[in-house]
Structures are given as structure tokens and as C-alpha cells.
């Protein structure tokens, strides 16, 4: 079986280097291109060399067009502004883009959705298929359990993470709100410090913990009088996200243009 050629955007970053090494170990794909920001010291260097593995025969470039010309699909771990430009390039070339980047504004996200009308784009800031399943379970549990069950969302990530809440927790909050039929923007409660009052009925609580090298723990608690249900997903290796993005890329090369989520990858025939 011929291996699918994948381009890595952000190939000089930590996740990009790990992704390159992971792809080269995979039996169904290989790295054929990489790109970095203009002016990066990684420009011109072999993408494999940047990852600390054998050369792959492709040098890092600042040209988004070139990476799509060389690749069957592109996986992005860069920064939001670069991702938007990549999505536009994906649309011009009609080739798949899997997005592992986080921290977009509403306008940036809408621009990516628009690019999805001309190319398969998979939005995968949390690319774990098990997390996609957790999100489904949270939505269904919130639908089945009425508001006698208080909902609390808790996240624990490493001490370098700067996004609060992470896109992962936002998805869990939105899933719980959808299950309850409420607006997540008005039902979410993120700060309780200094409040001298009982918990507001129907609110969806959120708490963020940061410490050490925790890759990502997310728990959704459904608590009522006399019982408590906890749904937890713990990630102990970043390989989970590398595997998920590669699975998404292998899936996306078979899809028509569209804006997809990991739920779509989970709910279809696997790549």
C-alpha cells in the first residue's frame, strides 16, 4: 500500500517535531513537506533533522502553497494567524487540512469554516477519539439527568498551558449545555471566589488546575443528593493527539469538502 504524503505545519515546534517522528514510524503515511513562519531559523533545514530522526528529503519552507502542492494532506500545529492562511491555501488546492492549533478568535474560526466549503478541514484541537466519545457521553448524560444533578467541569493541565478554559473544556461545557438545552455563555460559572451564596440552580461550574507536566485530565461531574457520576478522560502521553491527528488526516483524504470535527471521524468508518 502506498503511503500517504503528509505535510507538517509548525514542523520546528515541539508538537511539530513529535508529529514528524510519529508519521515516519507510521505504516500508512510519510512526511513529504514542512513549513514554518517566515524568518524562522528552521527554514531550509530537513524536516526529519528538526525532529531528531533520519532526513526525510524535504526542507522546511515558509511557503504555504508549496506544502499543499507536495502533500496529500497537511496537519497544522502552529499559531492561529498562520492556520487561517493555511486554511485558505487548503481551499485553493482542495486538499485536506487537520487543525491541532488552539486559541482562535470567532472571526478566525469563521474564516476557517468558510475555507471548509472548498476543502476537507478537520477541526481537532483535541484530536483524541476517546475525548470525542466523552463529549457525546456528556451531552447524552446531561439530557437524561435533570437539573437535580449539578454539573461541574474540571481540567488539569501542565503548568505552561496559557488557555483557560482550554478548547477541550469549552467543548465539554457546550456539550453539557446542549444536553440541558441551555445557553453555555449564561449558564457557565467559572469564578466562585468571594461568593457567599449557594450554588445557582442549573449552572455549569468550571474549575481549572495547572501543575507539573500533566498532559490533560478532564472530568465532568453530575452530582445529586446521595449519588455522583464522574466521567473522566486522562491523557498520559501526547502520542494520543499525534495518533488522532494522523487518523483524521487519513480519514480526510477520502472526504468531500466540508468543515469536520473529530465527532465526524469517530462516527464513520475508521481510516
Image (tube, helix red, strand yellow):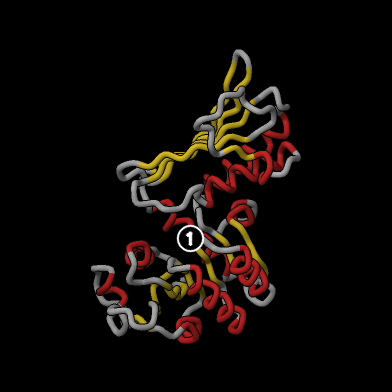
- Please determine whether, in this image, residue 157 is positioned above or below residue 90: above
Graded by Cα atoms within 10 Å as few (under 14), some (14 to 19) or many (20 or more), the crowding at tag 1 reads many
- Please determine whether, in this image, residue 224 is positioned above or below residue 74: above
Q: Is residue 2 visible?
A: no
Residue 243 in the image: state x and y as whole percent.
44, 56
Residue 223 in the image: state x and y as whole percent.
60, 23
Count of residue discs: 1
Residue 77 in the image: state x and y as whole percent.
43, 66
Towards the viewer: 5 or 88: 88
Residue 252 in the image: state x and y as whole percent.
58, 67
Residue drawn where x is 54% and y is 45% of the image: 169
- Please determine whether, in this image, residue 141 is positioned above or below residue 18: above
**Quadrant of the rendered structure where residue 13 is?**
bottom left
Towards the viewer: 247 or 146: 146
**Quadrant of the rendered structure where residue 113 is?**
bottom right
The answer to whether residue 105 is left or right of residue 236 is right
- Please determine whether, in this image, residue 205 is positioned above or below residue 54: above
The answer to whether residue 199 is left or right of residue 146 is left
Q: Is residue 13 visible?
A: yes
Furthest-right residue in view? 181
Towards the viewer: 225 or 87: 225
Residue labelled with disc 1: 245
Residue drawn where x is 58% and y is 79% of the image: 88
State which quarter of the image contains the C terminus.
bottom right
**Quadrant of the rendered structure where residue 97 is?**
bottom right
Residue drawn where x is 24% and y is 73% of the image: 54
Amino acid at each position: 500500500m502506498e503511503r500517504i504524503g503528509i505535510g507538517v505545519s509548525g514542523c520546528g515546534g515541539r508538537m511539530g517535531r513529535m508529529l514528524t517522528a510519529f508519521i515516519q514510524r507510521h505504516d500508512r503515511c510519510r512526511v513529504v513537506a514542512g513549513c514554518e513562519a517566515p524568518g524562522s531559523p528552521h527554514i531550509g533545514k530537513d524536516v526529519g533533522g528538526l525532529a531528531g530522526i533520519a532526513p526525510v528529503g524535504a526542507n522546511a519552507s515558509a511557503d504555504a502553497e508549496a506544502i499543499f502542492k507536495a502533500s496529500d494532506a497537511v496537519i497544522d500545529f502552529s499559531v492561529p494567524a498562520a492556520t487561517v492562511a493555511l486554511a485558505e491555501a487548503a481551499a485553493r488546492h482542495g486538499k485536506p487540512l487537520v487543525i491541532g492549533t488552539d486559541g482562535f478568535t470567532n472571526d478566525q474560526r469563521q474564516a476557517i469554516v468558510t475555507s471548509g466549503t472548498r476543502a476537507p478541514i478537520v477541526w481537532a484541537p483535541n484530536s483524541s477519539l476517546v475525548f470525542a466519545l466523552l463529549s457525546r457521553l456528556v451531552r447524552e448524560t446531561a439530557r437524561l439527568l435533570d437539573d437535580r444533578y449539578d454539573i461541574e467541569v474540571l481540567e488539569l493541565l501542565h503548568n505552561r498551558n496559557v488557555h483557560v478554559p482550554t478548547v477541550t473544556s469549552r467543548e465539554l461545557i457546550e456539550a453539557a449545555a446542549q444536553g440541558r438545552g441551555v445557553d453555555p455563555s449564561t449558564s457557565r460559572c467559572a469564578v466562585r471566589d468571594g461568593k457567599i451564596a449557594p450554588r445557582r440552580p442549573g449552572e455549569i461550574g468550571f474549575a481549572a488546575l495547572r501543575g507539573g507536566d500533566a498532559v490533560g485530565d478532564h472530568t465532568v461531574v453530575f452530582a445529586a443528593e446521595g449519588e455522583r457520576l464522574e466521567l473522566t478522560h486522562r491523557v498520559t502521553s501526547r502520542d494520543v493527539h499525534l495518533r488522532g491527528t494522523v487518523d483524521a488526516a487519513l480519514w480526510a483524504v477520502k472526504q468531500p469538502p466540508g468543515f469536520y470535527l473529530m465527532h465526524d471521524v469517530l462516527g464513520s468508518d475508521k481510516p
